[in-house]
Amino acid sequence: MSSADNAKLDMQQFIEMESSKSMLKFITCGSVDDGKSTLIGRLLYDSQLLYDDQLVELKKDSKGRASTDEDIDFSLLVDGLAAEREQGITIDVAYRFFSTTKRKFIVADTPGHEQYTRNMATGASTAEAAILLIDARLGVSTQTRRHAYILSLVGVKHILLAVNKIDLMDYSQQLFEEICAEFNSFAENLGFKSSYAIPISALKGDNITSRSARMPWYEGQPLLTYLETLDPEREDSTLFRFPVQRVTRSGQDFRGYAGTLAGGEIAVGDEVMVAASLKRSRVKRIVTMDGDLPVAGKGDAVTLTLEDEIDISQGDVLHRPGEPLERSNQFQAHMIWMHEDPMLPERSYLMKIGTQTTSVQITDLKYAININTSEHLPASKIDLNGIAVCNFATAQAIAFDAYADSPETGAFILIDRISNNTVGAGMIDFGLHRGQNLSWQSFEINRESRAKMKHQRPAVVWFTGLSASGKSTIADILEQKLAAQNRHTYLLDGDNFRHGLNKDLGFTDADRVENIRRVAEVARLMADSGLIVMTAFISPFRRERRMAREIAADIDFIEVFVDTPLEVCEARDPKGMYAKARKGEIPNFTGISSAYEPPERADIHLEAGNRSAEELAEEVLQQLQLD
Amino acid sequence: MSTKRHIHLQRLEAESIRIMRQVATDFERPVLLYSVGKDSSVLLHLAMKAFYPSKPPFPLLHVDTTWKFREMIAFRDDTAKRLGLELLVHTNPEGLAENINPFTHGSSRYTDIMKTVALKQALDAGKYDAAIGGARRDEEKSRAKERVFSHRAKGHVWDPKNQRPELWSLYNTRINPGESLRVFPLSNWTETDIWAYIYLENIPMSELYLARERPVVKRDGSWFMLDDDRFPLEDGEEPEMRSIRFRTLGCYPLTAAIESTAGTLAEVIIEMRSTHTSERSGRVIDKDQAASMEKKKKEGYF
């Protein structure tokens, strides 16, 4: 046999072995200095997965750092970013890869600092198992409880409790057993499917790849064996779920629905139903570039074609008749807040769930959760790394499952409308069915007919600007000019509003958001009745002005920025408010102790300065271009 | 991947396809950065699968430094033709006019001008809002932390300390005007996965990955191939013919070869199993300074 033939034979064995491996994604978590990075470095080292040049670099880097007495600082392998190396801590989620003859592993290494809860939740969201490290010297800590709670919240089912640094406690069996007992006493309520405990020393390599001679009393598996043999299969729901990612067209006739099965199985000939329209058809083909499949299972990325031409688009979800998803515009969910700017109820966010994206509001912040004690606490906002249970209302009804039943169709993220940052992550508990019965009533006499009687086109003219910038005065003159043209109008004024409809609201950020939401809703109703509505509110935040515009929906919305410099406003100070604010007597006063976010692109930008209100009102009138 | 035996490769394939489809659905002007190497070949193969029976709804973009191996350029043009895809090629015109090259200007400055700046020029010119690339997290430490959908602020700047959290498979694809995303469908693949997949799927790749007798010269302990007569020889350097191959493909003066007799894919894979150096060790640019890849990435390098 030639050497080429030998190579081919060897290679076929190799490919055979490589391709028959399964894959396990796990997360490592624990407190600062528990030794997570050292453990991962040790796993790579002991399974001889480091290349020579990486070892040379590692040895070079280890010099001049006194973080361990050993020759090699394994944590350097995983602490990748320069900033982290300088600080000696891990600050984000890092993914590491290694494989043994049995399995391929993807490890998410996440930090233990309290402020990094969001990173742990991120790492846990795709993990099938978790290694939870405990420092044997410290035992079960507050952070251990917090991490266990987050793992349970995000639905990680298999926990490996790695009691590390046992070498520093004389390899004490009694200590190990006490720690396990304490952990189990609270973990049993967290819904883990399995939990396993191993005493280890990541630094010295005890019980990592083989059982340590220094702990003859430990008769369980070494850590790597546990990872190689764990069966991570969740008791997955067998419900067929197919969120449509994309409609694929090709040539004259081909119309297919591309997506990844979020759950269950589907075969050619099976009947399917569209969650939104309840239309039915049967699967005609399961198309892939490698040829049609007779059947596809969870996780497969395929393209389905159907027997009938029914209307399906991106964002729709297919299921089997008789196994529907929930469909509602309201639901309750657990939520983790992930941004420095707090979550404010009533503020509008974008929500992404499966392949659906919609506008969402938190309608009720039911309670926050103290993750150290699982206690429920009342809250009016949620800060970074906070966890809360809330009710949500979406702009359109969405199709979903409870997260516990089907994580793929029950998980969502929240996106800030201005920055486009991912600010929150949620797991749906259940649908609230109020929304289903509450559909929009449509009446015979509609906006168009009401507007026609008034011979005008309704609009919302939204004035924004600092206190004393002249909003109300200009709006007042504008209204007189409109009245002179026989137009039907109404002026909603900030101060007047707060004496009535909004007298229950204060001036915190959360109350300001709700104030504007109510104003926007009232403005929309009045415009719907055919009026030209003017509003004169400071409305300092861009997000809320955008929300007002969205609430107005298909009604003309004209944002007028009364751009009067702060000095001018302060000099006017008709009610003495600025003087009080300067003395610190009024908290949260816009322009002084609370920000005003000027519009980036107002529809009408009034360079107000010292121009007269009459002149400015005339400018608005000219630019309004009313029919 | 039709057989159920290849469990983890099948999972990786499905994940990559899903990411590609997401890009096509959510962006107005996506582009696939095609670098001609083995990872690009896999990326392209997955793109063909993702949209089958239709074609990928985005063009290929190659940043040509003019110092690529000639075989790479031929392979690139053949590939685009074979698959019937639009191929765009960009070279930094100022760099070209000033004859910026790795010998006179040093690898660091050369890479910045002919690769990083050139890439930004091409992305700006095409107003691309998403650029798909073949980077993998196992390649290098700073890549290990990068998101699958990785945000770039105006000017293509990456801020590694301020990345968007990425949970489940719910990728946040929203951007403001002037911003963009880099998308890495191969994030979770390893080098071994790539080779196994190329073999199982019979994906065409450049012959430069296979050992052949090629003209080389030894410099600083590494073999460099004399792909054309622009490689200036130093005193005492004698070109010789050696059986060599490449583990990664880049600009020929910056890409070290390894001595090898592995003339077939099978032999390459076998040889790789017993190798003791990581694949990027042949890349000169990674080594210029500590944390050099992270620094380049912040500035917009892929």
Image (cartoon, coloured by chain):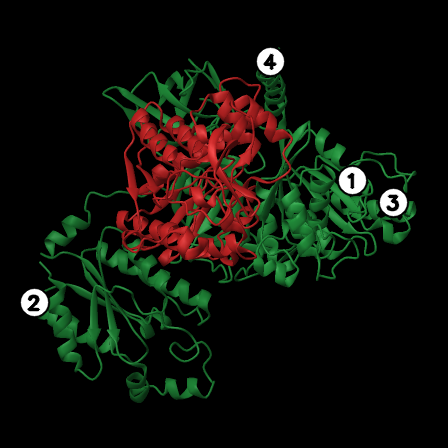
Chain colours: A green, B red
Instruction: Give the quadrant of the N terminus of chain A.
Output: top right
Label at residue A485: 2
Q: Quadrant of residue B81?
A: top left
CA distance for labels 4 and 2: 99 Å
Q: Chain of mark 3?
A: A
Reading the chain from its start, which is encountered first: label 2 or label 1? Answer: 1
| Label 4 element class | loop
Residue receiving disc 3: A177
Q: CA distance from mark 2 to mark 1?
A: 85 Å
Of helix, strand and loop, which one carries label 2? loop
Of the residues tagged 4 and 1, which is closer to the observer? 4
Amino acid identity at mark 1: Ile
Q: Residue A507, position in %: x, y?
A: 44, 72
Q: Are marks 4 and 1 in contact (CB under 8 Å)?
A: no
**Left or right: residue A334 compared with residue A261:** right
Q: Decide which of A445, A307 is in the foreground and name it.
A: A307
- Relative image position of residue A518 (x, y in whole percent): 36, 61
- Marks 4 and 1 sit apart, C-alpha to C-alpha, by 41 Å
The residue under label 1 is A208
3D distance between C-alphas at marks 3 and 4: 58 Å
Q: Earlier in the sequence, mark 3 or mark 4?
A: 4
Q: How many residues crowd around disc 2 within 10 Å: few (fewer than 14), some, or many (20 or more)?
A: few
Q: Are marks 1 and 3 on the same chain?
A: yes
Residue that protrudes farthest toward the front in the picture: B236
Label 2, label 3: how far apart the Cα atoms are? 86 Å
Which amino acid type is marked by label 2?
Gln
Nearer the N terminus, badge 4 or badge 2?
4
Number of other residues with Cα within 10 Å of mark 1, as a class: few under 14, some 14 to 19, many 20 or more = many
Q: Of B159 and A442, which appears nearest the observer?
A: B159
Q: Where's residue B227, x and y in %?
A: 40, 38
